[in-house]
Amino acid sequence: MKECPKCRRCYPDETDHCPQDGEPTAQTLLGEPTLDARYLLERRLGQGGMGVVFQARHIFLKTPHAIKVILPDLVGNDPMLTTRFRQEALAAAAIRHPNIIAVTDFGVVRGTMPFLVMEFVKGRSLQEIMAKEGAMPPERAWEFITAIAAGVGAAHRQNIVHRDLKPLNIMVQDDVPVAEGVKILDFGLAKIKSGELLGSFVQAQTSGLMGSPFYMAPEQWSDEEPDARADIYSIGVILYQMLCGDVPFKGSSIPSIMKKHLTMPPPTFQSMGVTVSPAIEGVVRHALEKEVDARIDSIEAFLSELHAAMNSTPFVGAMREKVALDPNRTMASAVTTLNPPPPPPGATTQAPLNSHTQFNASFEVMDGTISGVNRESQVQKQRAPLEDPEATHVQRKPVATAIVAPHEPSKPVRQTIDFKPQRRVSPIWIIGAAVLVLIVAGLGISAFFLLSSKQASNGPAPTPAPTISSGIKADLVAIDGGSFLMGRRKGPPQETPEHPVSVSSFQMDRTEVTNAEYAEFLRETNRAAPSHWAGTRPSFGQENWPVVNVSYDDANAFAHWRSKRDGVTYRLPTEEEWEYAARNGERGDLYPWGADWKENAAVLKEATPAPVGSRPDGKNRWGVVDLVGNVWEWTSSKTSVYPGNDTVIPPSVQDWIMIRGGCYVSDPGKSDAPVTACMRDFVPASTKNTLLGFRLVRSGP
């Protein structure tokens, strides 16, 4: 096979000059540019220590792919090459997650040259994005880091550690929301924990070092076998870089970088000229602990800690009061430990925060779309902390590849000034526009006085009849009234004792109120949107998620608006009504779906909420869904203890509001706060939190 040294296109051996630019071609790989009689190599995208990456096309299906060819000279004449490569390719292909570049095929050419076939993605690396944007606000960094963590967590559940996470190994597709567009590369050559597969001998045959020095965990610099916590360290470095625009440890040589990773604490954000909340900085430092046992031990725990830190942070531009909600905090612990002096006038009250709540995320496995690979641009080479000659991403135009010695990364340019010629406005046009404004204003004033005099003579104008919006309609389910035993005998203190309660018939929303319906309410009332929205719209693709970041007053205002819209009276449910529905009335089931626990019946141990109704197996006997999990739900009831419970409620929390149902990060494995239809908690009415939403009811059958 021959290649054009200028455009890197691939041609058969008989092609002496590139048809595109006329350059003489040079011999590269042995054989024709067709692998396994199926994949036509079209263009070289990059080359590194372990192989070459090509853009390719399936000869019969015409689908685009990225193919990494492992060079025989770099892996040696290992007689087990084919077997080991096949094992690792199968393991990599088993990681099916939307945030991981999918491995779709593999093969071995002439028995000595293995290759991996991957999806092809057009976009930019995270390194390019960070170089352009500089230090990111926490909300922006959260978008990227949750998607990265979702993909890495999926691999960890397959017992696969990436070992080389860095911004150049993370692609972001063009024109796709970040949550869907992030793609992690090079899992196909990751080190699998068993120690028997390709990663072990590829590592030994190359530099003896697997990973990029600026992002490598301390244990990767030794012979110690890294586990999932090495990836968490790398993610911590990436998060640090996103928040302050630079990596924490730099140096002019690999040994100097290694020494800092092994011995020095990361510089504070303040010393880097960046203001980040102590809670968020604490999570980053926890992820960057030198000692493996002191570090955050799982992706799920990392996301949980960061989520709690984000919710406890009053970000600039979003200074509304936020109370961080611990999904596993019990009412008893709050009552027995919370008895503060009355707050000064004007002070806000916040619920206790546990920044180390852990949960086990369960990310949905989906098929990916298309991936690609290439080298960064020459400008990027000047900014990147360390060049990776195997960076597999697509760039806008081809450039020559080079292996660059490690160097200190410079801070990215933070601002671009775009000078555009300004059009000169003629004074005649200015005078004409002013005259037009005066004429329109005069007509408006005249019309106002004419209307006023007409109303004065004819009496007050009749109130227009309310109009029903043509948008989303309420979907309620009738709940027959009856009696049941509320609470339970052996539950946490706040759920005891069991006591009889009677409930009249009512109707309840089949699902939690969605972002789409709440957006309609905002458009018609001009009420302030949840702080994490962009204007009056939720993030793309989240229209059918339950609305969150809404206070008790927001929920009641929505109920008033919907009541006026539909001509009936809606309200928040009482605690008794909510539990009656969640426990199937007089049946008294412990869960909405029945008496026994059922896997995948509720949105729990997840990184984000899910569309309402996405767990149909969790519906109650009347068809109401998501009564457990997804988001906590406001009720209309104030803080209380059940009859027969001696707990004394401090005056400072007596006006707080009961919430029910748990949320997407709740862990059913927590013994001190078991996830059931009986779980309850209380928060200030002003709470706005990404874990808390609501649904409405109306009285009567």
Image (cartoon, grey):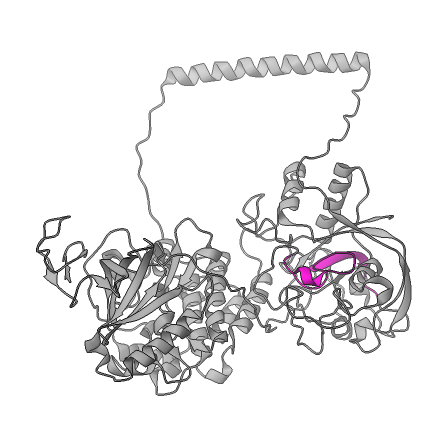
Number of marks drawn: 0
Q: Is residue 538 magenta?
A: no
From what the image shows, is residue 33 above or below residue 458? below
Q: Quadrant of residue 247?
A: bottom left
Q: Quadrant of the N terminus?
A: bottom left
Residue in front for this viewpoint, 238 or 42: 42
Residue 195: give x, y in percent of width and height: 38, 85
Q: Residue at x 37, y 76 (%)?
A: 88
Return the residue nearer the eye: 42 or 353: 42
Q: Position of residue 648 (x, y in %)?
A: 84, 71
* Residue 9 vertical position relative to residue 563 in the rendered view, above or below: below
Q: Position of residue 649 (x, y in %)?
A: 82, 69
Specify whether residue 467 is in view: yes
**Image quadrant where residue 310 sits:** bottom right
Q: Which is the main secondary structure of the residues drawn in magenta?
A: loop
Q: Reply yes or no: does residue 631 show up in magenta.
A: yes
Residue 243: quadrant of the picture? bottom left
Magenta part of the protein: which range? 614-640
Q: Is residue 197 left or right of residue 634?
A: left
Compared across the picture, whether 621 is left or right of 546 comes to right
Question: Can residue 273 be seen by looking at this rendering?
Answer: no
Which residue is depicted at the point 25% across and 57% down? 377
**Between residues 591 and 153, which one lies in front from this camera angle?**
591
